[in-house]
């Protein structure tokens, strides 16, 4: 396996598109239930935990950029081989490939659960899963530029949903936010941890970096994308706390969709149906990005064609839908993936950075001594 990738010119994309890519892979099905999950940990200071989680994500993103700048044009798969050698490196690569595949699976399964609860209660899981997986496969078959294009269209096509927060704000009681900072440090840290499933996704930068044209601008545009995500998540959480009564938010599984229920448009009473349908456009970039990164790992690790990896992973995840019959099973799978995501996105890059920096320092020192 080559450490540095040399994609042809036709596969490269402009750095400014990373704004849309980072935001789209961070914003997914987890946002719908985020306010409740964090509220259970940090109470009415949950919005502070969400903002702190976004700041932490920005710091880790900056650290990832520093790691990537130690190489000419490497992705995480190549960095593992360079740092740990062939056997340990490929072992870590396989673990990451499985993690990315699990993320892909959890995203569409949680969305299907929402569709079944809100719109089609009798819809078989495998049918909608098949449609979503085929959409992702079709997009990933077009290559990384199509994946980035899907992310761009997703952000542009759904940005209007944020304006609908003005409706629940009209009925909000901002006294629910007081007293501010009443949560202790343990509660705030728990809230940051609980935000990880919703705000992660930025670790995919470690895989798309070789395909960026202006690599010197990567830091700027990834930070802009993460900042937009942080502000959006913080505002959604804050509005949810002020809109719902204390006990109501704790009992509402998907508070964002519940707030959409009060939106009334001419000739349309159940706007949440529209919101659930449009949410497919929000989760599609997540699915495409994770499937692309996992199938890229299949190609890099096993030296096979990426399209073979796409179909193998797609069929395996579709087959797995038949084994998840109850909601509690999906909750358990989501919790496990969230814990793995916190390690993979927030913790492991810090450890990897220390190892990479130490190795590069020794290499520079060795070259200086030889010279």
Image (tube, rainbow, N blue to C red):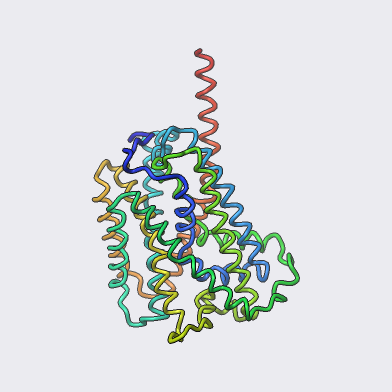
Q: In this view of the protein, which residue sits in the foreground, 297 or 47? A: 47
For the image shown, how many numbered marks are present on the structure?
A: 0
Classify residue 296 as left or right of residue 216. Answer: left
Could you tell me if residue 155 is visible in this image? yes
Residue 246, relative to residue 110: is it above or below?
Answer: below
Whole-percent x, y for residue 281 in the image: 39, 66
Identity of the residue drawn at 31% across and 38% down: 8
Could you tell me if residue 333 is visible in this image? no
Residue 62, relative to residue 366: is it above or below?
Answer: below
Residue 117, relative to residue 60: is it above or below?
Answer: below
Quadrant in the picture for residue 115: bottom left
Whole-percent x, y for residue 284 in the image: 38, 62
Whole-percent x, y for residue 346 in the image: 54, 50
Whole-percent x, y for residue 328 in the image: 44, 73
The quadrant of the picture occupied by the N terminus is top left
Residue 16, relative to residue 239: is it above or below?
Answer: above
Q: In this view of the protein, which residue sits in the foreground, 20 or 101? A: 20
Classify residue 46 as left or right of residue 119. Answer: right
Quadrant in the picture for residue 25: bottom left
Identity of the residue drawn at 50% across and 58% down: 339
Identity of the residue drawn at 29% across and 44% down: 299
């Amino acid at each position: 396996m080559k450490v540095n990738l040399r994609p042809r010119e036709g596969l490269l994309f402009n750095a400014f598109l990373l704004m849309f890519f980072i935001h789209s892979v961070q914003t997914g099905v987890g946002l719908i239930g985020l306010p409740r999950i964090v509220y259970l940990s940090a109470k009415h200071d949950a919005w502070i935990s969400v903002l702190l989680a976004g700041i932490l994500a920005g710091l880790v993103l900056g650290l990832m950029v520093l790691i990537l700048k130690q190489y000419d044009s490497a992705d995480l798969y190549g960095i593992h081989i360079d740092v740990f050698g062939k056997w340990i490196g490929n072992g870590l690569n396989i673990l990451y490939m499985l993690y990315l595949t699990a993320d892909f699976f959890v995203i569409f399964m949680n969305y299907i659960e929402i569709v079944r609860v809100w719109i089609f209660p009798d819809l078989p899981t495998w049918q909608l899963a098949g449609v979503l997986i085929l959409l992702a496969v079709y997009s990933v078959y077009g290559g990384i530029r199509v994946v980035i294009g899907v992310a761009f269209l997703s952000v542009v096509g759904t940005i209007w949903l944020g304006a609908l927060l003005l409706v629940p704000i009209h009925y909000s009681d901002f006294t629910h936010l007081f007293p501010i900072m009443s949560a202790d440090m343990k509660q705030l840290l728990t809230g940051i941890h609980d935000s990880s499933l919703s705000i992660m996704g930025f670790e995919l930068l470690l895989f798309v970096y070789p395909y960026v044209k202006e690599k010197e601008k990567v830091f700027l545009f990834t930070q802009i994308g993460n900042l937009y995500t942080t502000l959006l998540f913080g505002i959604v959480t804050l509005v949810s706390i002020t809109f719902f009564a204390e006990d109501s938010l704790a009992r509402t599984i998907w508070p964002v969709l519940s707030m959409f229920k009060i939106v009334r448009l001419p000739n349309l009473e159940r706007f949440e149906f529209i919101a659930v349908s449009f949410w497919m456009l929000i989760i599609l970039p997540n699915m495409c990005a994770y499937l692309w990164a996992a199938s890229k790992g299949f190609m890099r690790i096993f030296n096979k064609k990426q399209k073979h990896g796409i179909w193998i992973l797609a069929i395996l995840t579709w087959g797995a839908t038949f084994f998840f019959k109850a909601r509690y099973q999906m909750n358990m799978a989501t919790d496990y993936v969230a814990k793995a995501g916190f390690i993979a996105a927030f913790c492991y890059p810090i450890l990897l950075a220390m190892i990479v920096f130490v190795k590069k320092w020794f290499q520079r020192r060795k070259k200086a001594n030889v010279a």
